[in-house]
């Protein structure tokens, strides 16, 4: 999968170039690559930036750590 998730990032970026599906193809590509390779395949910077919610859509969730939520559901 490449050092630091290089192939993962390239796959999602390539999917974003599909003009007719740019709104959904990157998410689907990321989901499939994540299922195939596990969360370790994601670039570290992506994991870090997505871990804690900013609250832009739901302000009451600002600062929520998604790994903590996942752990409480497991």
Image (cartoon, rainbow, N blue to C red):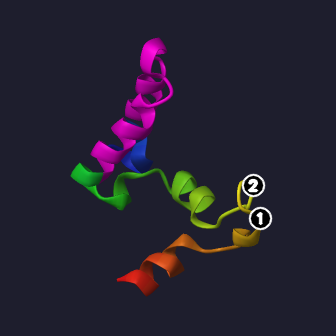
Asked if the residue at tag 1 contacts the one at tag 2, i.e. Cβ–Cβ closer than 8 Å, the answer is yes
* Quadrant in the rendering for residue 72: bottom left
Residue 32 locus on image (x, y percent): 28, 44
Region of the chain picked out in magenta, as a range: 9-34
Q: In which quadrant of the rendered view does residue 73 lie? A: bottom left
Residue 28 as seen in the image, left or right of residue 56? left
- Quadrant the C terminus occupies: bottom left
Q: Residue at x 33, y 43 (%)?
A: 2
Location of residue 65 in the rendering, given as x and y in whole percent from the top left corner? 60, 74
Q: What residue did someone put label 2 on?
A: 56
Query: Considering only vertical position in the picture, is 12 above or below 54?
Result: above
Q: Residue at 35% x, 53% y: name it.
A: 41
> In front here: 37 or 32?
32
> Distance between the Cα atoms at labels 2 and 1?
6 Å
Q: How many marks?
A: 2
Q: Which element carries disc 1, helix, strand or loop?
A: helix
Residue at (40% x, 29% y) in the render: 25
Q: Nearer the viewer, residue 43 or 19?
A: 19
Query: Which type of secondary structure does the marked residue at label 2 adopt?
Result: loop
Taking depth in this image into account, of 33 and 62 the one nearest to the observer is 62
* Above or below, comparing residue 44 to residue 70 in the picture: above
Residue 2, disc: none
Seen from this angle, which residue lies furthest top? 19
Assign the N terminus to one quadrant of the image: top left
Left or right placement of residue 44 versus residue 56 in this view: left
Q: Which label belongs to residue 59?
A: 1
- Position of residue 67 in the picture relative to residue 38 (left or right): right
């Amino acid at each position: 999968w490449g050092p630091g998730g290089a192939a993962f990032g390239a796959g999602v970026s390539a999917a974003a170039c599909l003009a007719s599906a740019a709104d959904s193809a990157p998410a689907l590509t990321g989901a499939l690559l994540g299922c195939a390779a596990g969360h370790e395949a994601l670039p570290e910077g992506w994991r870090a930036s997505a871990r804690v919610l900013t609250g832009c859509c739901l302000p009451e969730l600002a600062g929520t750590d998604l790994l903590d939520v996942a752990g409480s559901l497991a």
